[in-house]
Structures are given as structure tokens and as C-alpha cells.
Image (cartoon, rainbow, N blue to C red):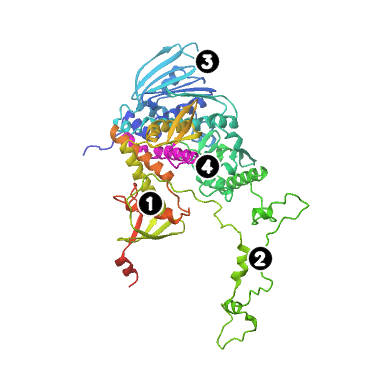
């Protein structure tokens, strides 16, 4: 019987390995930039065309490669970072596996020019799909210049699953931010063909301010801790600047980025009670630790790290964050003399020497609150009345109401401290007969719908469904309703958020949300009727986040299908931002409006994503519940 097991060719093995190491164009940039940092470069330039599909170029001024090194670097498991297994416990470089460059050249066309500073001539190497096409001497600058062209050109299935240009560009900018943040001492620039970002050398605080514009730097609080186990440094944002979405959360360990849910929980616990439950703080925290106390050899992407003393580091991290919050007066104080007192009682009188005026109450001098209402109206003393046998002392008929009438004279009707604004309305639905409604736990609407029964409705899903259908109808009719803002709202976007915004900008405009470019920033100049400037900013941020999350399908669909899915995603995200949230009290009029508009829809039972909007109890269902 012939043998059935044999070795795969290197080109096939490299393509398989590329599936783990090179997932998208952003992965190429990560590997090439980390190699440049390991080469001692202090200036790295990145050029991207067509979101990395046709060209990714990284130029550095590091120590370069010789002719032999340039050829050997693209062989599988060839590396200059380690020479034995013991070196894994002393890693100080970003790379060490020897997998990145072979994986890149296995699925693309690579061109390399490199020269060592002490050499007069460099080398020029061309590789296509792991096959070396030529290598020759070349006159070039010191350092290394690598061009990666036509990624996944020989793996059509992988190229087909690349996402839209805006999504891939957003991933590239996110990776650039991570690399720039972890290497503040390196000048880094990126040119995407439509935009260029150039970051100067500096410290961590300066790099944060250069990447994320606006007043983020002014919101930062320093975090410091130095122990024999770990040294922690970095920044957190003040609690009042916590974000509902797009929170910036970064851990940096020995010069590399890291995801660590356990340490993230340690930071979030410190903000308990200081921020709203649906908000998240931003943090940029750096760990300096003995390389022997961590293991980075867990995943090919090297962003998962195992720590030897996680419990100890948890305590140090938690203590450092709490100390920073307390030291900078970020923890709210309690005034036991004034807390829970009304504002008009706490506020001092205009003249400290004059006592505040007390309200006058008109109480009759012969008033006896213990007298029954009947005896009081008859003029007899209720206290002297003889009780009949069997009469209890509980639940007496008293006239306390007369006393409270005096106290409530002239008092204003109590109002909610935060009165909910009217729910957004776009169109009027067909009238549906609805009885009285009530709200349960500020989440559900319960009402009687004529001819249907008792409906228990999820208020958020119902309003989302209504707004989504109305927005779709508006899109289909070509009608655009927008109100101009007196003061345009500024959008503070990171580079990774600008790419998807360019793709959804036209759709948002058709829905009534107008964005204009002012210098390097975007501003909102128009909103749909009933939407405030702050709500418009929230809508845009939610749309960007939603499109980035849902865009995995765009690369697998035709142009028309992808465009239609994009419109649906934008419309759904916009409706979700405008819909009334769970936990919000609604008036009777608002509840009835939701119920009427919901049952006027052709299909009110499910949300656009397929979740149930309501449950209906007809007479038969109620009879089964109450046999």
C-alpha cells in the first residue's frame, strides 16, 4: 500500500500560516512596523493605496539588511531575534517567530530595497508568491524600504473576503494608532492617498494629544506605581469625561500592545459609583515588567500575554488608579450637612444678617386634626365621643387633609427634575383604537388595543421599529427633511473613524443629518426635525460604530447589495439612537402615540433585526392563564 503522508511544499505551508498571521492589510502594516522598530528605526513612513489592496509600503531608517539577510528574512522560521528556546523568557523585541515575512510574501508580491549604513551599496529583492524573481545590487538609502503589492492575489477566496475600502482603511488607522501609541519615541507618518498624518517624537502624553485631537489631554490624570514586581505609568481620564461609546482603552506592556480583560476589570472597578453604568473611562496604562515574568508566545498576533503574578499586578494597578482619582479630587465628596436638603433650604439668604422668610400658612386657631371629619363639620368634639362596641382604633376618620390644604396653598405642582423631552415624531400613523395605557418598570407599555387584546410592548423596540419604517419610507420617497443648526456641532473623530464616515455621509444627508468639512474636522450643520445637536453627535458616532461592526458582509456582496445593506445599517443605527430608551418615563400621550403608530405598521411584530416587539394576550390567552 503506498504511503499517504507527505510534506507540504513551503509555498503551501506559508499560505496556510498566512491565514493566522496576515488576516487583513492592517496585519501587514503591524508586522512591518514592528520589524522596523526592532531594527532601531526612529522614523517610519507608511504609504497605503486602495486601503492596502494594491500597495502597502513601509520605509524606515533602521540598521538595514545585507544581501544574505534580505534573502534569508523571507525563509520560514528565519529570525535574528532569538537563537534558542531559553531566549523566549528574555524577549525584548516585537517579533521572534520568523513567520511574518514568509507569510506576507506567500500571499502577495513583495519588493525590498535595503542598505546597511556602513555599506556603499544596498540590495534589491523581488519575490512573488514565495518565489524569488530577482535579487541585485541597488543604490538606495540606509534602512529598509518594503513594498507589498496586490495582497491575496494568489488566494482569490481570501481576497474576496476583504471588506469594503472604508472598513479596511478604518482597521489600518486603528492599527496605526496602536503602533504609534506604543512607540512615542519614533516619528511615524501614514499617507492613505487622501489623507496624511505625521506624528512627531515625544512622550506618551504628547503622543496621545497628537493622535486624538481636541481636549483629551486636558482630561487626563497621571497614574504611577513602582514596585519590585511591576512599574505602572500612564493616564486615565477624569470620571466626568467618561464616554458612552468609543472609549479609548489601551494597555502597553514592555513596548507592545495587549488585551487583558482581567486588568481591564481592575480599572473599571475603580470607577464604580463615579460614572454612569452605561459609560466607560478612557485609559492609557503602561506596564514595565521583567520579560521573564510574562509569556507573549501564546498567539501569532502576540497581543495576548500571560503574567506570572496576575493577582499582585491587579492589586498594584487597582491601587494606582484609585490613588490617582483620590489625589486629583476626582472622587465625589459628601456634605452631610446639606445632602438631601432642597436647594432653597441650603442656599443662604441674600443678607446673612436677616433670617430667610418662612412661608405663611393659614391654619384655624381652633383646628384639631384628631377630630373626625364628621364631628368637626357637626361642631362636636370627636375626642369626647363614646366609641361603640367593636369599633377599632385603626383607620380612624380624621381631617388631616385640612391641615395639608394650608401647607399646599400656593405650592407649585411637583415636577420631575429631568423631564423627558417629547419622543421624536416623523409621520402620523393610521389611527388605532387604544384604551388607557400604563408603563411598567419604565421599560414596557401595557395597553388595551381594540379588537386585539392586551398588548405588552417593549418601548425601545417599538419606537425603533416605528422610526426605522418611517426613515425607510423617507429614503424611498427621496424626501429630505432637515433643520439647520444655529450653532454647528463639532465632531471629534479619530483617524480610524473618519474612513467609515466618508462612506455613510451621503446616506446620513438623505436622512436629514447634514455634515460639512471645516478644515481637518467635520461639523454637523443640519439635523432631522426634533433632533438636538448633542443627539445628532450621538447618532453619528453610533452609525460609525454600527457600520464598522456590520461591514463584514460588504466584501462578499455585489456593489448593489453592499450599498443596500449599508443604507439599512445606517438607517437602523439612526433609528436606534433616536428611539426612546428603556428606563425613561413616558407620558400617557407618548405611550398612546407609540402604540397607535406601532399597530398602524404592516408588520409590527418584529424589529428589523428579528427581535419580538410585543406579546399579545387575547381573551383566550387570559382565560388559559386564569382557568
| Region in magenta | 527-555
* Front tag of 1 and 2: 2
Find residue 362 and name its label: 2
Give the quadrant of residue 509: top left
Q: Residues within 10 Å of mark 1 (few under 14, many from 20)?
A: many
Q: Tell me the CA gap for discs 1 and 3.
A: 67 Å
Q: Tell me the CA gap for discs 3 and 2.
A: 97 Å
The residue singled out by tag 1 in the image is: 462
Q: Say which element carries label 4.
A: loop
Q: Main secondary structure of the magenta part?
A: helix
Q: Say which element carries label 3.
A: loop
The residue singled out by tag 3 in the image is: 117
- Residue at screen point 25% across, 38% down: 4
Give the quadrant of residue 14: top left
Q: Tell me the CA gap for discs 1 and 4.
A: 26 Å
- Residue at screen point 34% across, 34% down: 16
Q: Tell me the CA gap for discs 4 and 2.
A: 51 Å
Determine whether label 4 and label 2 are within 8 Å by CB.
no
Q: Is residue 193 left or right of residue 202?
A: left
The x, y position of residue 317, in whole percent, is: 60, 44
The x, y position of residue 254, in whole percent, is: 56, 35
Amino acid at each position: 500500500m503506498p504511503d499517504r503522508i507527505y510534506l507540504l511544499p513551503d509555498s503551501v505551508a506559508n499560505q496556510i500560516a498566512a491565514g493566522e498571521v496576515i488576516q487583513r492589510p492592517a496585519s501587514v502594516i503591524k508586522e512591518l512596523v514592528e520589524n522596523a522598530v526592532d531594527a532601531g528605526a526612529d522614523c517610519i513612513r507608511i504609504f497605503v493605496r486602495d486601503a492596502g489592496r494594491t500597495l502597502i509600503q513601509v520605509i524606515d531608517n533602521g540598521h538595514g539588511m545585507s544581501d544574505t539577510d534580505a534573502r534569508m528574512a523571507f525563509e520560514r522560521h528565519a529570525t535574528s531575534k532569538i537563537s534558542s528556546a531559553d531566549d523566549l523568557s528574555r524577549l525584548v523585541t516585537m517579533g521572534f517567530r520568523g513567520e511574518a515575512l514568509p507569510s506576507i510574501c506567500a500571499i502577495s508580491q513583495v519588493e525590498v530595497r535595503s542598505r546597511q549604513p556602513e555599506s556603499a551599496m544596498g540590495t534589491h529583492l523581488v519575490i512573488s508568491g514565495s518565489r524569488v524573481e530577482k535579487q541585485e545590487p541597488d543604490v538606495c538609502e540606509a534602512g529598509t524600504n518594503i513594498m507589498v503589492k496586490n495582497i491575496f492575489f494568489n488566494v482569490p477566496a481570501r481576497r474576496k473576503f476583504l471588506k469594503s475600502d472604508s472598513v479596511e482603511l478604518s482597521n489600518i488607522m486603528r492599527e496605526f494608532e496602536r503602533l504609534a501609541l506604543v512607540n512615542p519615541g519614533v516619528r511615524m507618518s501614514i499617507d492613505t492617498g487622501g489623507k496624511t498624518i505625521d506624528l512627531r517624537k515625544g512622550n506618551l502624553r504628547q503622543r496621545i494629544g497628537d493622535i486624538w485631537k481636541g481636549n483629551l489631554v486636558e482630561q487626563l490624570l497621571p497614574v504611577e506605581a513602582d514596585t519590585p514586581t511591576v512599574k505602572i505609568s500612564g493616564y486615565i481620564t477624569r470620571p466626568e469625561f467618561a464616554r458612552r461609546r468609543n472609549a479609548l482603552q489601551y494597555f502597553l506592556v514592555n513596548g507592545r500592545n495587549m488585551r487583558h480583560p482581567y486588568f481591564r476589570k481592575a480599572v473599571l472597578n475603580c470607577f464604580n459609583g463615579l460614572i454612569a453604568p452605561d459609560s466607560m473611562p478612557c485609559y492609557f496604562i503602561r506596564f514595565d515588567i521583567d520579560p521573564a515574568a510574562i509569556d507573549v508566545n501564546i498567539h501569532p498576533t502576540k497581543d495576548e500575554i500571560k503574567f506570572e503574578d496576575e493577582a499582585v499586578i491587579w492589586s498594584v494597578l487597582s491601587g494606582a488608579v484609585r490613588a490617582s482619582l483620590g489625589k486629583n479630587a476626582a472622587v465625589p465628596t459628601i456634605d452631610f450637612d446639606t445632602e438631601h436638603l432642597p436647594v432653597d433650604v441650603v442656599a443662604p439668604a441674600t443678607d446673612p444678617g436677616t433670617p430667610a422668610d418662612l412661608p405663611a400658612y393659614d391654619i384655624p386657631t381652633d383646628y384639631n386634626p384628631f377630630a373626625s371629619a364628621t364631628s368637626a363639620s357637626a361642631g362636636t368634639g370627636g375626642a369626647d365621643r363614646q366609641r361603640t362596641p367593636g369599633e377599632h382604633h385603626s383607620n380612624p376618620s380624621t381631617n388631616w387633609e385640612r391641615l395639608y390644604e394650608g401647607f399646599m396653598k400656593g405650592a407649585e405642582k411637583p415636577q420631575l427634575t429631568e423631564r423627558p423631552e417629547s419622543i421624536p415624531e416623523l409621520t402620523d400613523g393610521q389611527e388605532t383604537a387604544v384604551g388607557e395605557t400604563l408603563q411598567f418598570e419604565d421599560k414596557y407599555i401595557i395597553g388595551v388595543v381594540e379588537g386585539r387584546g392586551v398588548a405588552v410592548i417593549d418601548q425601545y423596540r417599538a419606537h425603533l421599529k416605528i422610526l426605522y419604517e418611517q426613515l425607510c419610507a423617507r429614503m424611498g420617497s427621496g424626501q429630505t427633511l432637515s433643520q439647520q443648526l444655529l450653532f454647528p456641532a463639532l465632531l471629534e473623530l479619530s483617524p480610524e473613524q473618519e474612513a467609515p464616515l466618508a462612506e455613510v455621509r451621503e446616506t446620513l444627508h438623505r436622512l436629514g443629518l447634514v455634515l460639512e468639512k471645516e478644515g481637518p474636522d467635520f461639523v454637523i450643520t443640519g439635523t432631522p426635525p426634533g433632533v438636538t445637536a448633542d443627539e445628532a453627535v450621538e447618532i453619528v458616532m453610533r452609525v460609525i460604530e454600527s457600520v464598522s461592526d456590520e461591514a463584514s458582509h460588504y466584501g462578499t456582496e455585489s456593489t448593489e447589495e453592499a450599498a443596500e445593506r449599508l443604507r439599512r445599517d445606517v438607517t437602523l443605527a439612526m433609528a436606534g439612537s433616536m428611539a426612546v430608551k428603556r428606563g425613561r418615563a413616558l407620558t400617557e400621550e407618548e405611550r398612546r402615540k407609540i402604540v397607535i403608530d406601532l399597530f398602524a405598521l404592516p408588520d409590527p411584530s418584529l424589529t428589523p433585526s428579528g427581535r419580538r416587539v410585543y406579546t399579545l394576550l387575547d381573551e383566550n390567552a387570559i382565560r388559559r392563564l386564569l382557568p
